[in-house]
Amino acid sequence: MMSSVGAAVVVGGVVLPPLSLLGQRWRWVQEEDAAVARAGIALAQSTGLPTVVTHILAGRGYGTPDAMTAFLNPRLEQLPDPMTLKDMDRAIARLKQAIEAKETIAIFGDYDVDGTCATAILARYLKQVGIQPVLYIPDRLTEGYGPTSPAMETLAGQGVKLLITVDTGTTAHEALQKAANLGMDVLVTDHHQPAGALPPAAAILNPQRADDTSALQGLCGSGVVFYLLMGLNRALRQDGFFAGGRVEPRLAGLLDLVALATVADVMPLTTCNRVLVAKGLQQLATWQNRGLACLASVAGVKDDVSATTLGFALAPRLNAAGRIESARTALALLMAENDDEAYPLAESLNTLNKQRQDMEKAILAEARLQAEELFDDETLALVLHAEGWHPGVVGIVASRIKEQFNRPTFILGGDGNGALKGSGRCIAGLNLGAAVHTAKDILLSGGGHAMAAGVSLKAENVEAFRKALGEALRGQLEARVEDAHWPLAYRLAPVLQVEAQTTPAGLTSGLVETLQQIGPFGAGNPEPMLGLTHVKVTYAKPVGATQEHLKLRIADATGFGAPQLDAICFGACNNALGQTLANSGGRSLTLAVTARNRMFNGRPLLDVQVKDALPLL
Ligand SMILES: [Mn+2]
Protein backbone atom coordinates (compact mmCIF):
# COMPACT_ATOMS: atom_id res chain seq x y z
CA MET A 1 0.00 0.00 0.00
CA MET A 2 2.63 2.47 1.05
CA SER A 3 4.86 2.15 -1.97
CA SER A 4 2.02 3.15 -4.28
CA VAL A 5 1.72 6.62 -2.75
CA GLY A 6 3.32 9.44 -4.72
CA ALA A 7 6.36 11.61 -3.99
CA ALA A 8 8.32 8.60 -2.76
CA VAL A 9 12.02 8.99 -2.06
CA VAL A 10 14.30 6.41 -3.67
CA VAL A 11 17.59 5.83 -1.89
CA GLY A 12 20.00 3.17 -3.09
CA GLY A 13 17.22 1.36 -4.93
CA VAL A 14 15.01 1.31 -1.82
CA VAL A 15 11.76 3.23 -2.01
CA LEU A 16 11.00 5.25 1.10
CA PRO A 17 7.34 6.18 1.53
CA PRO A 18 6.80 9.94 1.36
CA LEU A 19 6.69 11.99 4.51
CA SER A 20 3.18 13.04 5.49
CA LEU A 21 1.81 16.54 5.01
CA LEU A 22 3.02 17.37 8.54
CA GLY A 23 6.46 15.90 7.82
CA GLN A 24 5.92 12.68 9.75
CA ARG A 25 6.93 9.16 8.85
CA TRP A 26 3.88 6.92 9.20
CA ARG A 27 4.22 3.43 10.56
CA TRP A 28 1.24 1.15 9.84
CA VAL A 29 1.50 -1.14 12.84
CA GLN A 30 -0.77 -3.96 11.60
CA GLU A 31 0.62 -3.96 8.07
CA GLU A 32 4.25 -3.93 9.19
CA ASP A 33 4.06 -6.42 12.04
CA ALA A 34 2.43 -9.72 11.12
CA ALA A 35 2.66 -11.09 14.68
CA VAL A 36 0.71 -8.13 16.05
CA ALA A 37 -1.89 -8.47 13.31
CA ARG A 38 -2.33 -12.19 14.08
CA ALA A 39 -2.60 -11.57 17.85
CA GLY A 40 -5.20 -8.85 17.22
CA ILE A 41 -7.38 -11.19 15.18
CA ALA A 42 -7.06 -14.03 17.70
CA LEU A 43 -7.95 -11.63 20.50
CA ALA A 44 -11.04 -10.42 18.63
CA GLN A 45 -12.16 -14.00 18.10
CA SER A 46 -11.73 -15.00 21.75
CA THR A 47 -13.19 -11.83 23.29
CA GLY A 48 -15.77 -10.63 20.80
CA LEU A 49 -14.32 -7.10 20.82
CA PRO A 50 -13.99 -5.21 17.52
CA THR A 51 -10.72 -5.90 15.68
CA VAL A 52 -9.97 -2.16 15.65
CA VAL A 53 -9.72 -2.36 19.45
CA THR A 54 -7.90 -5.70 19.68
CA HIS A 55 -5.39 -4.67 17.02
CA ILE A 56 -4.51 -1.59 19.06
CA LEU A 57 -4.21 -3.61 22.26
CA ALA A 58 -2.03 -6.22 20.56
CA GLY A 59 0.15 -3.47 19.10
CA ARG A 60 0.67 -2.06 22.58
CA GLY A 61 1.72 -5.41 24.02
CA TYR A 62 -1.61 -6.59 25.53
CA GLY A 63 -2.07 -9.38 23.01
CA THR A 64 -3.44 -12.14 25.29
CA PRO A 65 -6.93 -12.28 26.84
CA ASP A 66 -5.45 -12.07 30.38
CA ALA A 67 -3.22 -9.09 29.61
CA MET A 68 -6.08 -7.38 27.82
CA THR A 69 -8.58 -7.93 30.66
CA ALA A 70 -6.12 -6.63 33.27
CA PHE A 71 -5.33 -3.60 31.11
CA LEU A 72 -8.96 -2.69 30.41
CA ASN A 73 -9.94 -3.00 34.08
CA PRO A 74 -7.33 -1.16 36.18
CA ARG A 75 -7.77 -1.96 39.90
CA LEU A 76 -5.84 -0.91 43.00
CA GLU A 77 -5.24 -4.62 43.76
CA GLN A 78 -2.99 -4.73 40.67
CA LEU A 79 -0.47 -2.39 42.34
CA PRO A 80 2.76 -3.99 43.55
CA ASP A 81 3.09 -4.25 47.34
CA PRO A 82 4.71 -1.19 49.00
CA MET A 83 7.27 -3.39 50.74
CA THR A 84 8.87 -4.13 47.36
CA LEU A 85 10.30 -0.60 47.40
CA LYS A 86 13.85 -0.56 48.79
CA ASP A 87 14.16 0.98 52.30
CA MET A 88 10.38 0.94 52.88
CA ASP A 89 10.78 -0.93 56.18
CA ARG A 90 13.25 1.65 57.51
CA ALA A 91 11.11 4.58 56.33
CA ILE A 92 7.98 3.19 57.96
CA ALA A 93 9.75 2.45 61.24
CA ARG A 94 11.19 5.97 61.54
CA LEU A 95 7.96 7.70 60.52
CA LYS A 96 5.84 5.59 62.89
CA GLN A 97 8.15 6.51 65.73
CA ALA A 98 7.79 10.21 64.88
CA ILE A 99 4.00 10.01 64.67
CA GLU A 100 3.66 8.11 67.94
CA ALA A 101 6.05 10.47 69.77
CA LYS A 102 4.46 13.53 68.07
CA GLU A 103 7.85 14.80 66.93
CA THR A 104 8.09 17.93 64.78
CA ILE A 105 8.10 16.68 61.19
CA ALA A 106 9.01 18.84 58.19
CA ILE A 107 8.21 18.15 54.56
CA PHE A 108 10.64 19.56 52.00
CA GLY A 109 9.10 19.65 48.52
CA ASP A 110 10.04 20.74 45.05
CA TYR A 111 8.36 23.79 43.49
CA ASP A 112 6.83 22.04 40.49
CA VAL A 113 3.41 20.36 40.34
CA ASP A 114 4.77 16.95 41.36
CA GLY A 115 6.63 18.47 44.31
CA THR A 116 3.73 20.56 45.59
CA CYS A 117 1.27 17.67 45.14
CA ALA A 118 3.63 15.31 46.99
CA THR A 119 3.94 17.84 49.82
CA ALA A 120 0.15 18.19 50.02
CA ILE A 121 -0.44 14.41 49.94
CA LEU A 122 1.93 13.78 52.84
CA ALA A 123 0.79 16.84 54.81
CA ARG A 124 -2.90 15.95 54.43
CA TYR A 125 -2.21 12.42 55.66
CA LEU A 126 -0.09 13.54 58.61
CA LYS A 127 -2.81 15.99 59.70
CA GLN A 128 -5.28 13.12 59.71
CA VAL A 129 -3.04 11.18 62.10
CA GLY A 130 -2.60 14.16 64.41
CA ILE A 131 0.63 15.79 63.17
CA GLN A 132 0.89 19.42 61.96
CA PRO A 133 3.94 19.24 59.69
CA VAL A 134 6.22 22.16 58.85
CA LEU A 135 6.05 22.68 55.06
CA TYR A 136 9.05 23.96 53.14
CA ILE A 137 9.14 24.67 49.40
CA PRO A 138 12.28 26.49 48.22
CA ASP A 139 12.03 29.63 46.13
CA ARG A 140 13.03 28.76 42.58
CA LEU A 141 14.70 32.11 41.92
CA THR A 142 16.54 32.72 45.21
CA GLU A 143 17.19 29.19 46.53
CA GLY A 144 17.13 27.02 43.43
CA TYR A 145 16.30 23.34 43.29
CA GLY A 146 16.46 20.90 46.20
CA PRO A 147 17.56 20.96 49.85
CA THR A 148 20.33 23.42 50.78
CA SER A 149 22.40 23.87 53.93
CA PRO A 150 20.76 27.21 54.86
CA ALA A 151 17.32 25.58 54.52
CA MET A 152 18.47 22.77 56.82
CA GLU A 153 19.57 25.35 59.41
CA THR A 154 16.19 27.11 59.22
CA LEU A 155 14.32 23.85 59.75
CA ALA A 156 16.56 22.65 62.59
CA GLY A 157 15.99 26.06 64.20
CA GLN A 158 12.26 25.34 64.16
CA GLY A 159 12.78 22.19 66.21
CA VAL A 160 12.38 19.74 63.34
CA LYS A 161 13.50 16.22 64.29
CA LEU A 162 12.44 14.37 61.15
CA LEU A 163 12.68 15.81 57.65
CA ILE A 164 10.98 14.12 54.73
CA THR A 165 12.01 15.25 51.26
CA VAL A 166 9.47 14.71 48.48
CA ASP A 167 10.27 14.69 44.75
CA THR A 168 13.81 15.77 45.63
CA GLY A 169 16.77 14.92 47.88
CA THR A 170 18.52 12.04 46.09
CA THR A 171 21.53 14.13 45.07
CA ALA A 172 21.57 16.56 48.04
CA HIS A 173 24.74 15.20 49.66
CA GLU A 174 25.91 18.44 51.23
CA ALA A 175 22.52 19.51 52.63
CA LEU A 176 21.75 16.07 54.00
CA GLN A 177 25.15 15.89 55.68
CA LYS A 178 24.34 19.27 57.20
CA ALA A 179 20.97 17.93 58.40
CA ALA A 180 22.72 14.99 60.05
CA ASN A 181 25.18 17.34 61.75
CA LEU A 182 22.24 19.37 63.04
CA GLY A 183 20.66 16.24 64.55
CA MET A 184 17.82 15.84 62.05
CA ASP A 185 16.90 12.45 60.61
CA VAL A 186 16.03 12.58 56.93
CA LEU A 187 13.74 10.34 54.87
CA VAL A 188 14.26 10.89 51.17
CA THR A 189 11.32 10.14 48.87
CA ASP A 190 12.18 10.88 45.28
CA HIS A 191 12.20 9.59 41.72
CA HIS A 192 15.20 11.44 40.30
CA GLN A 193 18.26 9.53 39.09
CA PRO A 194 20.96 9.17 41.75
CA ALA A 195 24.34 10.68 40.82
CA GLY A 196 26.90 8.25 42.14
CA ALA A 197 26.70 7.37 45.84
CA LEU A 198 23.50 8.01 47.79
CA PRO A 199 23.47 10.83 50.39
CA PRO A 200 23.41 10.11 54.16
CA ALA A 201 19.79 9.50 55.23
CA ALA A 202 17.68 7.29 57.51
CA ALA A 203 15.96 5.88 54.42
CA ILE A 204 15.91 6.62 50.70
CA LEU A 205 12.76 5.61 48.84
CA ASN A 206 13.56 5.98 45.17
CA PRO A 207 12.65 3.41 42.52
CA GLN A 208 15.57 4.72 40.41
CA ARG A 209 18.11 3.43 42.99
CA ALA A 210 20.37 0.84 41.40
CA ASP A 211 19.50 -1.61 44.21
CA ASP A 212 15.73 -1.11 43.99
CA THR A 213 14.08 -4.24 42.61
CA SER A 214 10.46 -3.05 42.75
CA ALA A 215 8.46 -2.76 39.54
CA LEU A 216 7.75 0.89 40.35
CA GLN A 217 10.20 2.73 38.10
CA GLY A 218 7.34 4.69 36.49
CA LEU A 219 6.32 6.48 39.70
CA CYS A 220 6.66 10.24 40.04
CA GLY A 221 7.56 11.86 43.38
CA SER A 222 3.91 11.95 44.46
CA GLY A 223 3.56 8.28 43.52
CA VAL A 224 6.53 7.41 45.76
CA VAL A 225 4.95 9.36 48.64
CA PHE A 226 1.64 7.57 48.07
CA TYR A 227 3.50 4.28 48.27
CA LEU A 228 5.09 5.33 51.56
CA LEU A 229 1.60 6.08 52.89
CA MET A 230 0.28 2.71 51.69
CA GLY A 231 3.02 1.01 53.67
CA LEU A 232 2.72 3.32 56.70
CA ASN A 233 -1.08 3.15 56.91
CA ARG A 234 -1.01 -0.64 56.89
CA ALA A 235 1.71 -0.71 59.57
CA LEU A 236 -0.22 1.73 61.79
CA ARG A 237 -3.38 -0.35 61.36
CA GLN A 238 -1.54 -3.54 62.28
CA ASP A 239 -0.15 -1.76 65.37
CA GLY A 240 -3.68 -0.92 66.50
CA PHE A 241 -3.04 2.80 66.01
CA PHE A 242 -6.58 3.30 64.71
CA ALA A 243 -8.19 1.03 67.32
CA GLY A 244 -8.67 3.69 69.99
CA GLY A 245 -11.27 5.74 68.13
CA ARG A 246 -8.83 7.37 65.70
CA VAL A 247 -10.23 7.51 62.17
CA GLU A 248 -8.11 5.69 59.60
CA PRO A 249 -7.34 8.02 56.66
CA ARG A 250 -8.85 6.96 53.33
CA LEU A 251 -5.81 6.76 51.08
CA ALA A 252 -7.86 6.68 47.86
CA GLY A 253 -8.96 10.20 48.79
CA LEU A 254 -5.42 11.38 47.95
CA LEU A 255 -5.25 9.77 44.52
CA ASP A 256 -6.55 12.89 42.72
CA LEU A 257 -3.30 14.60 43.68
CA VAL A 258 -1.23 11.56 42.66
CA ALA A 259 -2.94 11.53 39.26
CA LEU A 260 -2.37 15.24 38.74
CA ALA A 261 1.32 14.97 39.61
CA THR A 262 1.84 11.88 37.44
CA VAL A 263 0.38 13.62 34.39
CA ALA A 264 2.17 16.92 35.11
CA ASP A 265 5.52 15.12 35.40
CA VAL A 266 4.83 13.40 32.04
CA MET A 267 5.29 9.91 33.51
CA PRO A 268 4.18 6.96 31.32
CA LEU A 269 0.52 6.09 31.95
CA THR A 270 1.21 2.37 31.96
CA THR A 271 1.48 -0.29 34.71
CA CYS A 272 1.27 1.25 38.21
CA ASN A 273 0.65 4.79 36.91
CA ARG A 274 -2.26 3.66 34.77
CA VAL A 275 -3.98 2.29 37.90
CA LEU A 276 -3.14 5.36 40.00
CA VAL A 277 -4.32 7.82 37.35
CA ALA A 278 -7.51 5.90 36.45
CA LYS A 279 -8.51 5.76 40.13
CA GLY A 280 -7.29 9.29 40.73
CA LEU A 281 -9.57 10.63 37.99
CA GLN A 282 -12.54 8.94 39.71
CA GLN A 283 -11.54 10.63 42.96
CA LEU A 284 -11.07 13.99 41.21
CA ALA A 285 -14.59 13.77 39.77
CA THR A 286 -16.02 13.77 43.33
CA TRP A 287 -14.45 17.26 43.75
CA GLN A 288 -13.85 16.58 47.45
CA ASN A 289 -10.54 18.40 47.11
CA ARG A 290 -11.95 21.92 47.10
CA GLY A 291 -8.69 23.46 45.95
CA LEU A 292 -8.74 21.38 42.77
CA ALA A 293 -12.49 22.02 42.41
CA CYS A 294 -12.05 25.81 42.57
CA LEU A 295 -9.08 25.68 40.20
CA ALA A 296 -11.09 23.62 37.70
CA SER A 297 -13.91 26.12 38.02
CA VAL A 298 -11.76 29.19 37.25
CA ALA A 299 -10.14 27.23 34.42
CA GLY A 300 -13.58 26.73 32.86
CA VAL A 301 -13.49 22.91 33.08
CA LYS A 302 -16.98 21.71 32.12
CA ASP A 303 -16.62 18.37 30.36
CA ASP A 304 -15.91 15.06 32.03
CA VAL A 305 -12.50 15.05 33.66
CA SER A 306 -9.70 13.22 31.88
CA ALA A 307 -5.93 13.17 31.92
CA THR A 308 -6.21 16.13 29.52
CA THR A 309 -7.99 18.13 32.24
CA LEU A 310 -5.04 17.46 34.53
CA GLY A 311 -2.36 18.21 31.94
CA PHE A 312 -3.86 21.22 30.20
CA ALA A 313 -6.22 22.90 32.68
CA LEU A 314 -4.93 22.25 36.20
CA ALA A 315 -1.17 21.61 35.91
CA PRO A 316 -0.23 24.79 33.97
CA ARG A 317 -2.07 26.96 36.50
CA LEU A 318 -0.30 25.32 39.45
CA ASN A 319 3.01 25.53 37.62
CA ALA A 320 2.54 29.21 36.83
CA ALA A 321 3.07 29.88 40.54
CA GLY A 322 6.42 28.07 40.70
CA ARG A 323 7.51 29.61 37.42
CA ILE A 324 6.62 33.21 38.08
CA GLU A 325 5.95 33.82 41.76
CA SER A 326 6.10 31.27 44.49
CA ALA A 327 4.90 27.68 44.58
CA ARG A 328 3.57 28.37 48.06
CA THR A 329 0.30 29.70 46.54
CA ALA A 330 -0.10 26.40 44.71
CA LEU A 331 0.59 24.44 47.88
CA ALA A 332 -1.87 26.54 49.89
CA LEU A 333 -4.50 25.78 47.26
CA LEU A 334 -3.83 22.05 47.37
CA MET A 335 -4.09 22.14 51.17
CA ALA A 336 -7.24 24.32 51.29
CA GLU A 337 -10.10 22.88 53.34
CA ASN A 338 -13.00 24.90 51.94
CA ASP A 339 -14.02 27.19 49.09
CA ASP A 340 -13.56 30.37 51.11
CA GLU A 341 -9.88 29.52 51.39
CA ALA A 342 -9.47 27.96 47.96
CA TYR A 343 -11.31 30.29 45.62
CA PRO A 344 -9.12 33.42 46.01
CA LEU A 345 -6.00 31.25 45.63
CA ALA A 346 -7.42 29.66 42.47
CA GLU A 347 -8.18 33.11 41.06
CA SER A 348 -4.70 34.34 41.80
CA LEU A 349 -3.16 31.26 40.14
CA ASN A 350 -5.39 31.86 37.14
CA THR A 351 -4.12 35.44 36.90
CA LEU A 352 -0.51 34.29 37.19
CA ASN A 353 -1.20 31.76 34.44
CA LYS A 354 -2.55 34.50 32.16
CA GLN A 355 0.62 36.51 32.79
CA ARG A 356 2.66 33.42 32.03
CA GLN A 357 0.76 32.85 28.79
CA ASP A 358 1.27 36.46 27.67
CA MET A 359 4.97 36.28 28.48
CA GLU A 360 5.25 32.93 26.71
CA LYS A 361 3.51 34.30 23.62
CA ALA A 362 5.83 37.30 23.40
CA ILE A 363 9.00 35.24 23.90
CA LEU A 364 7.77 32.58 21.45
CA ALA A 365 7.27 35.21 18.75
CA GLU A 366 10.80 36.56 19.27
CA ALA A 367 12.30 33.08 19.40
CA ARG A 368 10.48 32.10 16.20
CA LEU A 369 12.05 35.04 14.34
CA GLN A 370 15.52 34.06 15.56
CA ALA A 371 14.92 30.44 14.59
CA GLU A 372 13.74 31.35 11.08
CA GLU A 373 16.88 33.41 10.60
CA LEU A 374 19.22 30.64 11.78
CA PHE A 375 17.52 27.61 10.31
CA ASP A 376 18.74 25.93 7.14
CA ASP A 377 18.81 22.39 5.74
CA GLU A 378 21.97 21.55 7.69
CA THR A 379 20.76 22.81 11.09
CA LEU A 380 20.81 20.11 13.74
CA ALA A 381 20.25 22.20 16.86
CA LEU A 382 18.70 25.59 17.54
CA VAL A 383 20.22 27.73 20.32
CA LEU A 384 18.14 30.90 20.75
CA HIS A 385 18.69 33.57 23.38
CA ALA A 386 17.82 37.03 24.66
CA GLU A 387 18.77 38.74 27.89
CA GLY A 388 15.15 39.50 28.82
CA TRP A 389 13.62 36.04 28.37
CA HIS A 390 12.13 34.90 31.70
CA PRO A 391 13.63 31.67 33.10
CA GLY A 392 10.14 30.48 34.07
CA VAL A 393 8.94 29.99 30.51
CA VAL A 394 12.08 29.02 28.56
CA GLY A 395 11.26 25.30 28.81
CA ILE A 396 7.78 25.72 27.34
CA VAL A 397 9.06 27.95 24.54
CA ALA A 398 11.81 25.41 23.77
CA SER A 399 9.11 22.72 23.40
CA ARG A 400 7.08 24.85 21.00
CA ILE A 401 10.06 25.76 18.81
CA LYS A 402 11.23 22.15 18.82
CA GLU A 403 7.80 21.02 17.60
CA GLN A 404 7.66 23.62 14.85
CA PHE A 405 11.19 23.12 13.50
CA ASN A 406 11.62 19.49 14.51
CA ARG A 407 15.15 20.11 15.81
CA PRO A 408 16.61 19.97 19.34
CA THR A 409 16.14 23.48 20.74
CA PHE A 410 17.67 25.52 23.57
CA ILE A 411 16.04 28.73 24.80
CA LEU A 412 18.33 30.86 26.98
CA GLY A 413 17.58 33.99 29.02
CA GLY A 414 19.71 36.27 31.18
CA ASP A 415 20.37 34.94 34.69
CA GLY A 416 20.66 38.44 36.19
CA ASN A 417 24.43 38.07 36.70
CA GLY A 418 25.59 38.58 33.14
CA ALA A 419 25.39 34.93 32.14
CA LEU A 420 22.78 33.00 30.14
CA LYS A 421 20.68 30.19 31.52
CA GLY A 422 18.00 28.05 29.96
CA SER A 423 16.37 24.81 28.92
CA GLY A 424 16.60 22.49 25.96
CA ARG A 425 14.12 20.02 24.50
CA CYS A 426 15.01 17.18 22.15
CA ILE A 427 13.37 15.19 19.36
CA ALA A 428 13.10 11.39 19.45
CA GLY A 429 16.18 9.44 18.40
CA LEU A 430 18.79 11.91 19.69
CA ASN A 431 20.21 12.33 23.20
CA LEU A 432 20.36 15.96 24.31
CA GLY A 433 21.80 15.25 27.78
CA ALA A 434 24.73 13.38 26.22
CA ALA A 435 25.29 16.19 23.71
CA VAL A 436 25.36 18.77 26.53
CA HIS A 437 27.85 16.62 28.40
CA THR A 438 30.31 16.73 25.49
CA ALA A 439 30.08 20.56 25.54
CA LYS A 440 30.68 20.82 29.30
CA ASP A 441 34.02 22.69 28.99
CA ILE A 442 32.17 25.62 27.39
CA LEU A 443 29.46 25.69 30.07
CA LEU A 444 29.23 27.04 33.61
CA SER A 445 26.88 24.16 34.36
CA GLY A 446 24.76 21.74 32.39
CA GLY A 447 23.08 18.37 32.46
CA GLY A 448 19.95 16.48 31.63
CA HIS A 449 18.61 13.39 29.96
CA ALA A 450 17.77 12.30 26.42
CA MET A 451 14.72 14.51 25.89
CA ALA A 452 15.44 17.56 28.09
CA ALA A 453 18.45 19.40 29.48
CA GLY A 454 19.44 22.63 31.22
CA VAL A 455 22.58 24.76 30.85
CA SER A 456 24.14 28.01 32.01
CA LEU A 457 27.00 29.68 30.19
CA LYS A 458 28.77 32.98 29.62
CA ALA A 459 27.08 35.07 26.91
CA GLU A 460 30.27 35.16 24.81
CA ASN A 461 30.23 31.35 24.58
CA VAL A 462 26.84 31.01 22.87
CA GLU A 463 28.33 30.54 19.41
CA ALA A 464 30.80 27.93 20.69
CA PHE A 465 27.98 26.09 22.48
CA ARG A 466 25.80 26.09 19.36
CA LYS A 467 28.66 24.66 17.34
CA ALA A 468 29.59 22.03 19.94
CA LEU A 469 25.98 20.95 20.33
CA GLY A 470 25.52 20.63 16.56
CA GLU A 471 28.70 18.58 16.27
CA ALA A 472 27.76 16.28 19.14
CA LEU A 473 24.32 15.64 17.64
CA ARG A 474 25.85 15.05 14.21
CA GLY A 475 28.15 12.51 15.85
CA GLN A 476 25.14 10.74 17.33
CA LEU A 477 23.49 10.64 13.90
CA GLU A 478 26.66 9.33 12.26
CA ALA A 479 26.81 6.54 14.83
CA ARG A 480 23.29 5.50 13.88
CA VAL A 481 23.77 2.96 11.10
CA GLU A 482 20.27 1.62 10.51
CA ASP A 483 19.04 4.69 8.61
CA ALA A 484 22.42 6.14 7.59
CA HIS A 485 21.52 6.19 3.87
CA TRP A 486 18.34 8.23 4.38
CA PRO A 487 18.06 11.99 3.74
CA LEU A 488 18.42 14.12 6.90
CA ALA A 489 14.78 15.31 6.90
CA TYR A 490 13.73 11.68 6.77
CA ARG A 491 16.03 10.59 9.58
CA LEU A 492 14.78 13.35 11.87
CA ALA A 493 11.09 13.00 10.97
CA PRO A 494 8.80 12.06 13.87
CA VAL A 495 7.21 8.61 13.52
CA LEU A 496 3.39 8.46 13.64
CA GLN A 497 2.07 5.05 14.65
CA VAL A 498 -1.16 4.31 12.77
CA GLU A 499 -2.50 1.53 14.94
CA ALA A 500 -5.60 0.27 13.17
CA GLN A 501 -7.69 1.00 10.09
CA THR A 502 -11.35 1.81 9.91
CA THR A 503 -13.86 3.49 7.56
CA PRO A 504 -16.20 6.49 7.90
CA ALA A 505 -19.10 4.06 8.36
CA GLY A 506 -17.18 1.96 10.88
CA LEU A 507 -16.16 4.85 13.10
CA THR A 508 -19.25 4.86 15.34
CA SER A 509 -19.78 6.19 18.85
CA GLY A 510 -20.14 2.56 19.96
CA LEU A 511 -16.67 1.70 18.69
CA VAL A 512 -15.26 4.87 20.23
CA GLU A 513 -16.76 4.00 23.60
CA THR A 514 -14.81 0.74 23.60
CA LEU A 515 -11.67 2.56 22.44
CA GLN A 516 -11.98 4.93 25.39
CA GLN A 517 -11.45 2.01 27.77
CA ILE A 518 -7.82 2.05 26.60
CA GLY A 519 -7.47 5.43 28.43
CA PRO A 520 -6.55 7.41 30.46
CA PHE A 521 -4.51 8.70 27.54
CA GLY A 522 -1.25 10.56 27.88
CA ALA A 523 2.48 9.87 27.84
CA GLY A 524 3.20 6.19 27.14
CA ASN A 525 -0.48 5.48 26.42
CA PRO A 526 -1.50 7.79 23.59
CA GLU A 527 -4.94 8.28 22.13
CA PRO A 528 -5.39 5.57 19.45
CA MET A 529 -4.44 6.81 15.98
CA LEU A 530 -6.73 5.36 13.31
CA GLY A 531 -6.06 5.20 9.59
CA LEU A 532 -8.82 6.06 7.10
CA THR A 533 -7.83 5.05 3.54
CA HIS A 534 -9.66 5.83 0.30
CA VAL A 535 -11.74 8.66 1.72
CA LYS A 536 -12.65 12.02 0.26
CA VAL A 537 -13.47 15.41 1.71
CA THR A 538 -17.00 16.41 0.72
CA TYR A 539 -17.10 19.71 2.62
CA ALA A 540 -14.44 21.95 4.16
CA LYS A 541 -14.89 25.28 5.90
CA PRO A 542 -12.48 27.39 7.99
CA VAL A 543 -13.80 28.05 11.51
CA GLY A 544 -12.55 29.62 14.74
CA ALA A 545 -11.83 33.17 15.90
CA THR A 546 -9.14 33.68 13.24
CA GLN A 547 -10.42 30.98 10.86
CA GLU A 548 -7.48 28.84 11.93
CA HIS A 549 -9.30 25.49 12.11
CA LEU A 550 -10.89 23.47 9.35
CA LYS A 551 -14.32 21.89 9.72
CA LEU A 552 -14.68 18.87 7.43
CA ARG A 553 -17.05 16.23 6.20
CA ILE A 554 -15.50 12.95 5.11
CA ALA A 555 -16.94 10.10 3.08
CA ASP A 556 -15.77 6.87 1.52
CA ALA A 557 -14.11 7.80 -1.79
CA THR A 558 -15.78 4.98 -3.69
CA GLY A 559 -19.10 4.67 -1.87
CA PHE A 560 -22.23 6.41 -3.07
CA GLY A 561 -24.65 7.76 -0.47
CA ALA A 562 -22.54 6.18 2.29
CA PRO A 563 -22.63 7.75 5.78
CA GLN A 564 -20.54 10.89 6.13
CA LEU A 565 -18.35 11.73 9.08
CA ASP A 566 -18.01 15.20 10.60
CA ALA A 567 -14.46 16.03 11.64
CA ILE A 568 -12.22 18.93 12.56
CA CYS A 569 -8.58 19.69 11.85
CA PHE A 570 -7.20 22.10 14.45
CA GLY A 571 -4.81 24.90 13.58
CA ALA A 572 -4.41 23.61 10.03
CA CYS A 573 -5.50 26.52 7.86
CA ASN A 574 -1.99 27.81 7.31
CA ASN A 575 -0.17 24.53 6.89
CA ALA A 576 0.14 21.94 4.15
CA LEU A 577 -2.34 19.63 5.86
CA GLY A 578 -5.17 22.16 5.96
CA GLN A 579 -4.47 23.43 2.47
CA THR A 580 -4.52 19.95 0.99
CA LEU A 581 -7.71 18.96 2.81
CA ALA A 582 -9.44 22.17 1.74
CA ASN A 583 -8.41 21.82 -1.90
CA SER A 584 -8.44 18.06 -2.50
CA GLY A 585 -11.26 18.36 -5.06
CA GLY A 586 -12.84 15.04 -4.10
CA ARG A 587 -9.64 13.08 -4.70
CA SER A 588 -8.87 9.98 -2.63
CA LEU A 589 -7.03 10.67 0.64
CA THR A 590 -5.38 8.70 3.43
CA LEU A 591 -6.01 10.28 6.86
CA ALA A 592 -4.85 9.67 10.42
CA VAL A 593 -7.60 10.53 12.91
CA THR A 594 -8.43 10.29 16.60
CA ALA A 595 -12.00 10.01 17.88
CA ARG A 596 -13.69 10.47 21.22
CA ASN A 597 -17.21 10.72 22.58
CA ARG A 598 -17.89 13.87 24.52
CA MET A 599 -20.72 16.10 25.59
CA PHE A 600 -21.22 19.38 23.75
CA ASN A 601 -23.94 21.76 24.98
CA GLY A 602 -25.54 18.88 26.84
CA ARG A 603 -25.62 16.55 23.85
CA PRO A 604 -23.37 13.61 22.97
CA LEU A 605 -20.92 14.38 20.18
CA LEU A 606 -18.57 12.10 18.24
CA ASP A 607 -15.47 14.27 18.09
CA VAL A 608 -13.25 13.18 15.18
CA GLN A 609 -9.97 15.06 14.72
CA VAL A 610 -7.84 14.79 11.59
CA LYS A 611 -4.22 14.67 12.81
CA ASP A 612 -2.33 14.19 9.56
CA ALA A 613 -2.68 13.01 5.97
CA LEU A 614 -0.48 11.52 3.28
CA PRO A 615 0.25 13.66 0.21
CA LEU A 616 -2.22 13.41 -2.66
CA LEU A 617 -1.30 11.00 -5.44
MN1 LIG B 1 8.91 14.93 39.94
Image: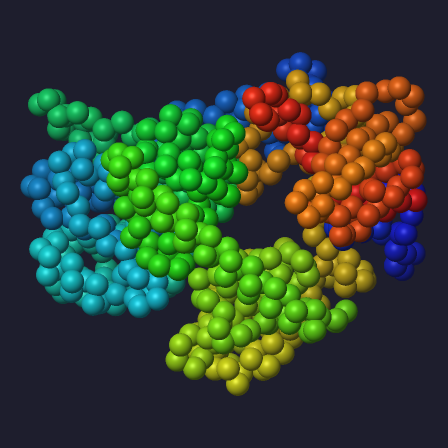
Residue 236 placed where, x, y %? 17, 31
Looking at the rendered image, the quarter that the N terminus falls into is top right
Residue 217 appears in the rendering: no
Is 574 located above or below residue 381 in the figure? above
Residue 390 placed where, x, y %? 46, 67
Give the camera-side residue of 89 and 370.
370
Q: Please give left or right for residue 504 compared with residue 44 in the image.
A: right
Residue 188 placed where, x, y %? 27, 52
Q: Please give left or right for residue 508 compared with residue 580 in the image.
A: left
Is 608 located above or below residue 9 in the figure? above
Looking at the rendered image, the quarter that the C terminus falls into is top right
Q: Residue at x 36, y 43 (%)?
A: 346
Q: Residue at x 12, y 43 (%)?
A: 98
Q: How is the image coloured?
A: rainbow
Q: How many numbered marks appear?
A: 0
Q: Residue at x 76, y 52 (%)?
A: 575
Residue 559 placed where, x, y %? 90, 23
Give the camera-side residue of 385 and 443.
385
Q: Residue at x 78, y 47 (%)?
A: 577
Which residue lies most toward the bottom here? 460
Give the camera-side residue of 50 and 574.
574
Residue 579 appears in the rendering: yes
